[in-house]
Image: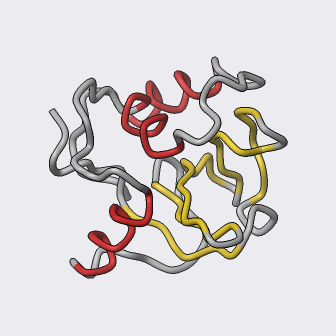
Amino acid sequence: MITETTPRSVEEALRWQLDRIGSSAWEGWALRFQRLAFGYAGEAGWRHCSEAFDWFRGHDLLSDGAPPRGALAWFRVGETITVRSGLGDGEVIGPGVNGRIGVIDHEDLGRYLGWTSAIFPFAR
């Protein structure tokens, strides 16, 4: 269960993301896309997904198993760490699906690293 409070609820954040399906404007901005989806206008405090992932892992906040609805799902795609949002039933949403915002099974994106709650401790 995701319990941390964000400016937008999980359902509002996922609706925001679903409204952008097919857009190519967010390519290369996975962390920013998630931060904005959850309602944070200010920067997340991390420049790259890898920095955020390392912070979550270093604070023992990384969980195994399929990402629950509204969780941040972390992946290694080639040499890059990236993030998507869990939709439930093993699906995730975010940029990088054929160069666009899309929905994909979490097992089909790259090497799945685990999930964390959708928190941005340094964002405003």
Q: Is residue 117 left or right of residue 34?
A: left
Q: Is residue 80 left or right of residue 54?
A: right
Which residue does the image show at 44% across and 58% down from the upper left? 49
Q: How many marks?
A: 0
Which residue does the image show at 69% across and 67% down from the upper left? 77
Q: Nearer the viewer, residue 71 or 54?
A: 54
Q: Nearer the viewer, residue 61 or 31?
A: 31
Q: Nearer the viewer, residue 79 or 53?
A: 79
Which residue does the image show at 71% across and 45% down from the upper left? 96
Whole-percent x and y of residue 56?
Answer: 30, 70
Q: Which quadrant is the C terminus positioned in?
A: top left
Q: Which quadrant is the N terminus positioned in?
A: bottom left
Give the quarter of the image for residue 106: bottom right
Q: Is residue 93 left or right of residue 55?
A: right
Residue 77 vs 2, above or below: the answer is below
Residue 51 vs 111, above or below: the answer is above
For this orientation, the residue located farthest to the top is 19
Whole-percent x and y of residue 101?
Answer: 70, 33
Q: Is residue 94 left or right of residue 105?
A: left
Q: How is the image coloured?
A: secondary structure
Give the quarter of the image for residue 102: top right
Which residue does the image show at 78% across and 38% down from the upper left? 99
Whole-percent x and y of residue 72?
Answer: 46, 55
Q: Nearer the viewer, residue 72 or 110?
A: 110
Whole-percent x and y of residue 118?
Answer: 36, 50
